[in-house]
Amino acid sequence: MKPPHRNRRLGLIALVGGSLIVGVALILSALNENTQFFYNPADVLAENFEPKSETFRIGGLVVDGTVVHEGITTTFDLADFERPTPSPIRVTHSGQLPNLFREGQGVVVSGRMVSETEFLADDVLAKHDENYQPKIEYQDDIES
C-alpha cells in the first residue's frame, strides 16, 4: 500500500507540469501572432516573394521627389538601400509621420501589400545614422 502523501505529491507534480505546458503554449501562440517579419524592397518585388504573414515590415530609402502630402495621407516611393529594383514600392500612409521623415532618408514601414508594387503602411519609423544630432530649440532662442 502506498502512503497517501505520495499520491498527493504526484498529483501536485502533474498539476504543476500541466500548468507549465499550457502556459508555454499560450506564450508561444501569442508571440507567433504578433511577429512581424522584415524585408528589403528588392525581396518584396521578387517574383517568388511569399510573405510569412499578412502584415510585415519593409526597410528602405525614401526616393527623392516622390513625397506627396494630401491632408493626413502621405504617399512616397521606397527603394532598396543596396540592390537595384525594377520599380520602387509605392507606400501610402494615413496619419502623422515622424519628425525625422524626409526624402532621401531611411525608413521602416509596417503594414501590408495591396498590389504587387503598392504598400499600405500602418506605421512609419524614420531611421538615422549614429551621427544624428537633433535640432535643439532653447527657450532663450525662441523668445528673442
Image (tube, helix red, strand yellow):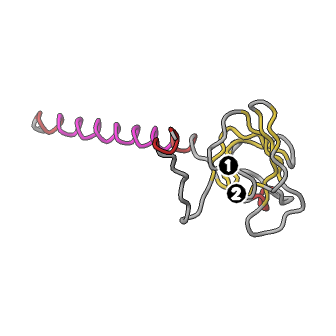
The amino acid beneath tag 2 is Gln
Q: Position of residue 28 (x, y in %)?
A: 48, 44
| Dominant SS type (magenta) | helix
Q: Nearer the viewer, residue 66 or 28?
A: 66
- Is residue 136 shown left or right of residue 21? right
The amino acid beneath tag 1 is Phe
Residue projecting furthest to the front: 144
Q: Do the numbered discs 2 and 1 sit on residues whose CB atoms are within 8 Å? A: yes
User: Residue sitting at 84 percent across and 50 percent down?
Assistant: 66
User: Residue beneath label 1, please?
Assistant: 101
Residue stretch in magenta: 8-28
Indicate which disc residue 105 carries: 2
User: In this rendering, is residue 113 above or below 103?
Assistant: above
User: In this rendering, is residue 23 above or below 126?
Assistant: above
User: Residue sitting at 73 percent across and 65 percent down?
Assistant: 81
Quadrant where the image shows the N terminus? top left
Which quadrant of the structure image shows residue 40?
bottom right
User: Residue sitting at 14 percent across and 39 percent down?
Assistant: 6
Q: Position of residue 98 (x, y in %)?
A: 62, 43
Question: Is residue 5 one of those drawn in magenta?
Answer: no
